[in-house]
């Protein structure tokens, strides 16, 4: 056996960690920019040399460098003559120019001299930046960037020199790659992305928005939301606007919770109410949350989110879906249960409402994209053709998720068949079903149950966070993460701890939609006025004041109805049907066409309304508003018919449209206008006043 | 030269199992040209059966060894930085070796044979010459280059006859059909093309035929030795892991085989009765040309086997990763 | 009050929360047009946007000598300019090459529609941080718009990359909607509602303004509410109260033979509409011609239009009629000299034909064509390599193109626009003038 030991010593391979391809050479390629999408990382490669995008496929890159074309790129007899070195050092013509630093060239050289081995000497366990948050004091201040990698066997290394740091906004943060310092040029919160091997993490840097410190220690706090918000506002030295008055709050919370304006009676009662303001507001919130209108509005909302595209002319399916969802929301079924049902339901879409979810996607890939967008807040589609460049998702994740849905037949009856597969574009083979980022599933089993379990479990980080982010967005006009379907490490939340807390709270309380909404609308943050001072005027993401938000098309259409008493027609629906209650999103409707209806083909999260010129033209000259102000069935003309006092008519217009009575100044002004006119013109003037109110920003916005 | 004395079988088995040991021949003895792992791969080989020699080329140079024992005899001085293909002229009077300096030039050297004296040095290409071929009458040879161009030359004066341009990417393989039937080339653009060529410059501009069946790069070609059929048959291997058989003059693909590892080199043995395909996993797969089944999978090297040659008896010489060179006796 | 990083105090360009979408911003003081050396001639621009990425190899950069898997189904034909050839499916364009400039060496890194659209329609490389305004919106902002018509019109409509970006919806395109070739086409809502006349409309407008004033004056203590007059409202008001508007959009006023020459389908009539709008004082018109993403069936889609067509009515002949007629019509009316015409898409297509007789996305080299407005007629700028894969000579990036377009329009590429939070963004970044394009 001694001779065996001698043999082992003589013949054993040399394990030299300084030549570890996976953890020493790959970073050189990324750091030198070789594998970006515009160079060798392009799908077609460059100059015949293809590397995986940003180093996503180490096996393929090793093969391309060492084995392709019989090893033309490295010279093992004369390492310094290797093409791999001569090109990026410009010894040989290179379109990419001088790409590599001396340290990188040295590493490549010594690796080639060692025989260009692939020894897999160590694995990356963790990658972190020190620090992950910075708070700086002034413009021009510099921050040193440092990154550390922790490998198995307990070793750690400062890998700052091999980490790629990129500022998401180069106009606000400039990076000096050689000294690895970031210089902060503008006030605000900024992100730098650090990339090493297959990890991407964000570094957040904040520079307060003013030189004057603020003291929010005496600000009222209703719940944890206010704590988080005020902390950030203090760091950033932003002032806060005071809490809004009752009328503003009432209108805002009614629109946000039940998608409609408060009625005249509700407004008058609320404004006249006695007792402590915050108690009154909380009671109103409770009543709104209990109402059936809430359930109807949120059915509309959730279906929007899930992009329910009814099959044209299949009203029964749309009805079944709508009825089912309404029932779930009415019965306070936990959101994760709803998600579970949607993911796993099969059957006749005319009977089994949730089966329509699967039907609404044309194929497995589209369904995977919808599932990741709607239930995880993730845009998985980038990972179709290559590993997602800004996040952790691989092609195997994307195609694997699609594979979970591959066996569904998506007709009027949704059923699970025995065959159906998707091809994993990377391997060219059938994709193995996979829970993205986690593990593969057995090939011939129906993976949807397992996927649904994973998604619905309290340990799943994606579902709760993406859902509460959307709830937040609905209430504030901006998600803690924007866009809400693009949640990733490199697109951090403005308030990460708050987001986590909201998600945790949501899970703790049984994924209850109403619970989290209550938390949000009861917070002091939500109640703030939209008025601003010099300091917080431009704040659009730290919630120092309320943001003005355009009303969604369907809500606006209903608001016009509520303000005037004149409804629109929606196909064959009975008169008085509200836009948010429509079962079929494609029901013919001139009003919705004009206002910009959400077609649900694309994400409905970004519907713009009332901003376009054709919409404005229609508001000026079209039926939408004009028909309502002249209609004898409208409140205006009905009041006129009862010979009501002119002042009361003006007040009625205000109360119904703006949810407040006119001020004395306003009332006097309008009365003056009216009485200055000829008697037979006064009706027209009143119509014009109502018209004006319905076209002013106080009406058109949720403020 | 066999530097390693024989060792206890159990230890040997252990070493092989753990991958620490490299090439073994059928007798179980280690066969290595050198013990270090920093050697460049053998990327071109040729067997001169008449003289009992085997020649191997790599970035470390040109080495002449005995055949079949593979003992080193001498090195041939060469200026070629990389060597990617070589071929002895059918009449045995010239050894053509080619390669060059990657991204800079493609070059070839012609040695009188068997003297080994350098006759001519050509540098006619802008990037590596990846493949060479001789016409069966030894009067014409071709250099196929990574610069997308194939050039033909007269044996008499090494003068360029044709400049064949048409491949849109690097050309990786070339083979003359018997007689005056032309030359077949293939490469990165995934096509196999047939061209006219002769001792005088060709009149036709484009290829006579183009085959696009391969779905990835085509890396090797081998013409089947004259069989009963008069119609020539050619085998191509591609990165799509297929081995395809064609009748290029007729214009069709006959059939194809799939192999489990990317094929890197191909040659016919037994007067065309079997195909040997050396692969990236270091194994050589024997493919029956009529059934297109893989009949044998034979261990050869520990990694990519880039080059392959056969002698008249059907014994194979495989060269590849780490300077490994391995003889596989005929089956 | 915080200062912008250049030390200048904040101007009155305000943004209010999510109000950009509503177009609610105070009118920014119109910037005086900065002086430029030379006398740029273009006063207006028509962009024919060929959405999807038209194949350069089938239109402006045919490669008859390329290998068969690259070559494509169409042959080149000679044109009015000796030595310049275009594809056989563009015979009318061939007749007017003496009036146009072809660029064959456009190059971009973006092969995905969204990113490529953003780059080509603004000249700025896309970034997640900002939405850059498109050419039309920048022109709308920089022009002193004396006309009652919107400065920037889109036919029938365009997506966000051709929109206003951070400039706000005041500078977004007016999308006319519909299909100008249809008999019943009309721009909606230009007529007053029954019972409303211009006097009453004015009163209504004044009332809205008063309501906004009341809002602003409301008592918020030391705070202010940033809700201003709606610029879109003002624009709409001007449009409906101007007699010119309806006329400009009414194609029935054009003689039938002129309409026929342009081509009676959507694209031809849109080109004609664009000419009318320019005549009426619109500064920028984008015609959105979709369908060029030909991953399959090149002959069917680009030439025939439908199976078995004897006379081709596909994308290329349609483009050919419309484009050539537009250029000639502008020339005949003495308008070509001050109207810049551009026809382009977001990228070219793969040199290697795919398995479906089509080509896939290829941004590395592609072609476009320009005419009028000071563009040098009768030239070809740049060239691609033998197989149409990479620029072989004189690469032109979309940033370079943007620089040149702005230059021709008399807009200083270095001029700084501002985002709502005061960040300065030059009209053009990183581009260089393509001098060969100047007459």
Image: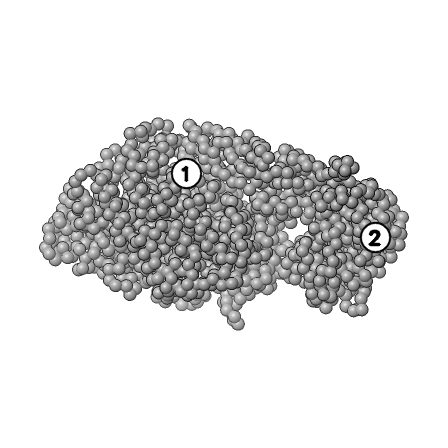
Residue B149 seen anywhere in this rendered image of the structure: no
For disc 1, the marked residue is A496
Closer-to-camera residue (C223/C229): C223
In this rendering, would A663 be left or right of C157?
A: left
For disc 2, the marked residue is B47
Q: For the point 62% across and 46% down, which residue is it? A: A59
In this rendering, would B5 be left or right of B240?
A: right
Image colouring: one colour
Q: For the point 44% across and 46% down, which residue is it? A: A460
Mark 1: few/some/many CA within 10 Å (<14, 14-19, 20+): few
Give the foreground label among 2 and 1.
1
Q: In this rendering, is residue C245 above or below B23?
A: below
**Quadrant in which the N terminus of chain A appears:** top right
Q: Position of residue A2 (x, y in %)?
A: 77, 36
Q: For the point 21% across and 41% down, which residue is it? A: A280
Mark 2: few/some/many CA within 10 Å (<14, 14-19, 20+): many
Task: State how far apart marks 2 and 1 are (Cα).
Answer: 69 Å
Q: In this rendering, is residue C138 above or below A360?
A: above
- Count every numbered label the image shows and give the total: 2
Q: Mark 1, chain letter?
A: A
Residue B37 figure quarter: top right
Q: Position of residue A514 (x, y in %)?
A: 31, 47
Residue A278 figure quarter: top left
Q: Position of residue A165 (x, y in %)?
A: 52, 36
Q: For the point 11% across and 53% down, which residue is it? A: A644
Q: Mark 2, chain letter?
A: B
Q: Position of residue A11 (x, y in %)?
A: 75, 39
Label 2: state its secondary structure: strand
């Amino acid at each position: 056996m001694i001779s065996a030991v001698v043999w082992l010593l003589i013949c054993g391979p040399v394990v030299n960690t300084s030549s570890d391809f996976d953890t020493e050479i790959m970073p050189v390629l990324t750091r030198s920019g070789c594998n970006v999408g515009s160079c060798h990382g392009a799908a077609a490669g460059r100059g015949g040399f293809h590397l995986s995008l940003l180093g996503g496929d180490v096996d393929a890159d090793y093969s391309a460098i060492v084995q392709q074309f019989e090893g033309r790129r490295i010279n093992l007899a004369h390492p310094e003559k290797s093409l791999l070195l001569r090109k990026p050092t410009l010894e040989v013509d290179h379109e990419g120019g001088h790409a590599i630093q001396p340290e990188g060239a040295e590493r490549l050289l010594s690796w080639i001299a060692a025989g260009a081995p692939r020894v897999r000497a160590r694995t990356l366990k963790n990658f972190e930046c020190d620090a992950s948050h910075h708070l700086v004091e002034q413009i021009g201040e510099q921050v040193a960037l440092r990154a550390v990698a922790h490998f198995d066997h307990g070793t750690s290394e400062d890998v700052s020199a091999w980490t790629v740091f990129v500022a998401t906004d180069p106009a606000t943060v400039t990076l000096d790659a050689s000294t690895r310092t970031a210089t902060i040029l503008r006030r605000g919160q900024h992100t730098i992305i650090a990339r090493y091997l297959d990890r991407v993490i964000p570094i957040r840097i904040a520079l307060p928005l003013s030189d004057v410190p603020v003291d929010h220690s005496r600000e009222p706090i209703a719940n944890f939301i206010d704590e988080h918000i005020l902390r950030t506002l203090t760091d950033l030295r932003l002032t806060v606007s005071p809490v809004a008055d009752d009328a503003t709050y009432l209108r805002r919370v009614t629109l946000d919770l039940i998608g409609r304006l408060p009625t005249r009676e509700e407004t008058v009662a609320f404004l006249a109410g006695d007792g402590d303001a915050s108690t009154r507001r909380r009671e109103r919130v409770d009543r709104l949350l209990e109402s059936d209108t809430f359930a109807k509005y949120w059915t509309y909302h959730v279906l929007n989110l899930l992009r329910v595209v009814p099959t044209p002319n299949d009203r029964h399916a749309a009805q079944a879906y709508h009825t089912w969802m309404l029932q779930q929301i009415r019965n306070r079924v936990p959101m994760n249960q709803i998600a579970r049902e949607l993911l796993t339901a099969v059957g006749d879409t005319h009977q089994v409402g949730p089966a329509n979810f699967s039907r609404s996607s044309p194929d497995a890939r589209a369904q995977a994209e919808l599932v990741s967008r709607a239930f995880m807040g993730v845009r998985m589609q980038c990972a179709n053709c290559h590993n997602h460049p800004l996040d952790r998702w691989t092609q195997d994740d994307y195609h694997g998720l699609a594979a979970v849905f591959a066996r569904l037949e998506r007709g009027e009856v949704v059923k699970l068949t025995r065959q159906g597969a998707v091809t994993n574009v990377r391997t060219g083979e059938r994709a193995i079903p996979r829970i993205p980022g986690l593990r593969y599933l057995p090939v011939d089993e129906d993976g949807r149950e397992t996927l649904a379990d994973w998604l619905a479990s309290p340990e799943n980080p994606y579902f709760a966070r993406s859902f509460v982010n959307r709830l937040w967005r609905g209430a504030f006009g901006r998600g803690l993460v924007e866009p809400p379907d693009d949640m990733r490490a490199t697109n951090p939340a403005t308030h990460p701890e708050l987001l986590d807390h909201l998600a945790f709270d949501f899970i703790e309380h049984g994924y209850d939609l109403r619970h989290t909404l209550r938390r949000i609308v009861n917070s002091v943050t939500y109640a703030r006025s939209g008025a601003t001072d010099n300091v917080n005027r431009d704040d659009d993401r730290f919630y120092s004041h309320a943001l003005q938000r355009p009303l969604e098309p369907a809500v606006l259409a209903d608001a016009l109805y509520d303000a005037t008493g004149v409804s629109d027609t929606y196909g064959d629906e009975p008169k008085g049907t509200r836009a948010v209650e429509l079962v079929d999103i494609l029901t013919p409707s001139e009003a919705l066409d004009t206002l910009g209806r959400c077609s649900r083909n694309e994400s409905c999260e970004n519907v713009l309304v009332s901003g376009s010129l054709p919409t404005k033209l229609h508001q000026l000259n079209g039926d939408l508003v004009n028909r309502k102000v002249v209609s004898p069935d409208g409140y205006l003309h009905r009041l006129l018919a009862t010979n009501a006092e002119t002042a009361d008519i003006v007040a009625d217009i205000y109360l119904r449209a703006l949810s407040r009575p006119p001020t004395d100044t306003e009332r006097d002004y309008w009365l003056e206008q009216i009485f200055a006119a000829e008697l037979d013109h006064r009706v027209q003037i009143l119509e014009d006043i109502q018209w004006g109110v319905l076209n002013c920003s106080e009406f058109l916005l949720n403020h | 030269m066999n530097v390693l004395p024989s060792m206890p079988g159990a230890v040997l088995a252990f070493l092989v199992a753990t991958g620490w040991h490299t090439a073994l021949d059928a007798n179980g003895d280690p066969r290595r040209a050198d013990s270090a792992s920093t050697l460049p791969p053998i990327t071109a080989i040729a067997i001169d059966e008449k003289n009992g020699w085997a020649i191997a080329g790599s970035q470390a140079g040109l080495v002449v060894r005995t055949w079949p024992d593979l003992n080193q005899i001498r090195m041939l001085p060469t200026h070629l930085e990389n060597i990617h293909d070589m071929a002895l002229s059918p009449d045995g009077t010239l050894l053509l070796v080619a390669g060059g300096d990657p991204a800079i030039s493609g070059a070839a050297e012609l040695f009188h044979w068997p003297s080994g004296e350098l006759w001519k040095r050509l540098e006619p290409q802008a990037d590596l010459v990846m493949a060479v071929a001789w016409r069966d009458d030894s009067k014409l040879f071709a250099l196929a280059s990574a610069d997308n161009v194939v050039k033909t030359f007269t044996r008499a004066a090494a003068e360029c006859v044709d400049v064949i341009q048409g491949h849109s990417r690097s050309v990786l393989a070339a083979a003359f059909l018997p007689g005056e039937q032309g030359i077949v080339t293939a490469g990165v653009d995934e096509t196999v093309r047939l061209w006219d060529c002769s001792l005088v410059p060709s009149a036709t501009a484009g290829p006579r035929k183009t085959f696009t069946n391969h779905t990835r790069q085509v890396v090797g070609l081998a013409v089947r030795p004259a069989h009963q059929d008069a119609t020539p048959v050619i085998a191509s291997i591609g990165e799509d892991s297929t081995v395809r058989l064609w009748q290029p003059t007729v214009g069709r693909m006959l059939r194809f085989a799939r192999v489990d590892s990317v094929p890197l080199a191909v040659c016919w043995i037994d007067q065309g009765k079997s195909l040997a395909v050396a692969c990236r996993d270091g194994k050589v797969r024997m493919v029956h040309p009529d059934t297109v089944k893989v009949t044998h999978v034979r261990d050869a090297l520990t990694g990519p086997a880039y080059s392959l040659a056969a002698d008249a008896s059907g014994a194979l010489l495989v060269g590849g990763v780490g300077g490994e060179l391995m003889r596989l006796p005929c089956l | 009050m915080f200062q912008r990083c250049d030390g200048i105090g904040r101007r009155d360009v305000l943004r209010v929360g999510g109000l950009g979408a509503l177009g609610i911003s105070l009118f920014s003081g119109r910037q005086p047009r900065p002086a430029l050396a030379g006398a740029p001639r273009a006063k207006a621009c028509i962009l024919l946007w060929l959405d999807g990425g038209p194949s350069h190899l089938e239109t402006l950069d045919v490669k008859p000598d390329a290998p068969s898997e690259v070559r494509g189904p169409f042959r080149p034909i000679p044109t009015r300019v000796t030595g310049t050839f275009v594809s056989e499916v563009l015979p009318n364009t061939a007749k007017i090459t003496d009036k146009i400039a072809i660029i064959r060496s456009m190059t971009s890194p973006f092969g995905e529609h969204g990113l490529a659209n953003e780059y080509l329609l603004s000249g700025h490389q896309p970034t997640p941080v900002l939405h850059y305004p498109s050419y039309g919106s920048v022109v709308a902002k920089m022009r002193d718009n004396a006309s009652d018509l919107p400065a920037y019109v889109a036919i029938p409509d365009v997506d966000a990359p051709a929109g206003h970006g951070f400039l706000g919806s005041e500078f977004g395109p007016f999308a006319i909607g519909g299909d100008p070739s249809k008999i019943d086409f009309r721009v909606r809502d230009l007529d007053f509602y029954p019972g409303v006349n211009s006097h009453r409309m004015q009163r209504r407008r004044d009332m809205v303004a008063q309501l906004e004033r009341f809002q602003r004056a409301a008592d918020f203590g030391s705070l202010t509410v940033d809700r201003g007059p709606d610029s879109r409202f003002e624009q709409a008001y001007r449009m409906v109260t101007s007699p010119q508007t309806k006329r400009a959009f009414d194609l029935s006023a054009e003689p039938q033979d002129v309409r026929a020459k342009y081509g009676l389908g959507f694209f031809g009539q849109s080109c004609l509409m664009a000419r009318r709008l320019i005549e009426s004082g619109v500064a920028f018109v984008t015609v959105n011609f979709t369908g060029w993403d030909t991953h399959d069936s090149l002959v069917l889609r680009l030439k025939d239009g439908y199976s078995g067509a004897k006379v081709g009515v596909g994308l290329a002949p349609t483009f050919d009629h419309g484009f050539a007629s537009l250029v000639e019509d502008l020339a005949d009316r003495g308008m070509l000299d001050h109207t810049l015409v551009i026809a382009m898409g977001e990228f070219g297509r793969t040199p290697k034909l795919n398995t479906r007789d089509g080509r896939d996305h290829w941004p590395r080299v592609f072609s476009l064509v320009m005419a009028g407005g000071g563009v040098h007629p009768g030239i070809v700028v740049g060239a691609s390599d033998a197989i149409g894969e990479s620029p072989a000579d004189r690469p032109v990036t979309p940033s370079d193109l943007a620089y040149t377009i702005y230059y021709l329009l008399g807009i200083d590429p270095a001029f700084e626009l501002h985002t709502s939070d005061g960040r300065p963004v030059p009209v053009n970044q990183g581009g260089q003038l393509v001098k060969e394009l100047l007459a």
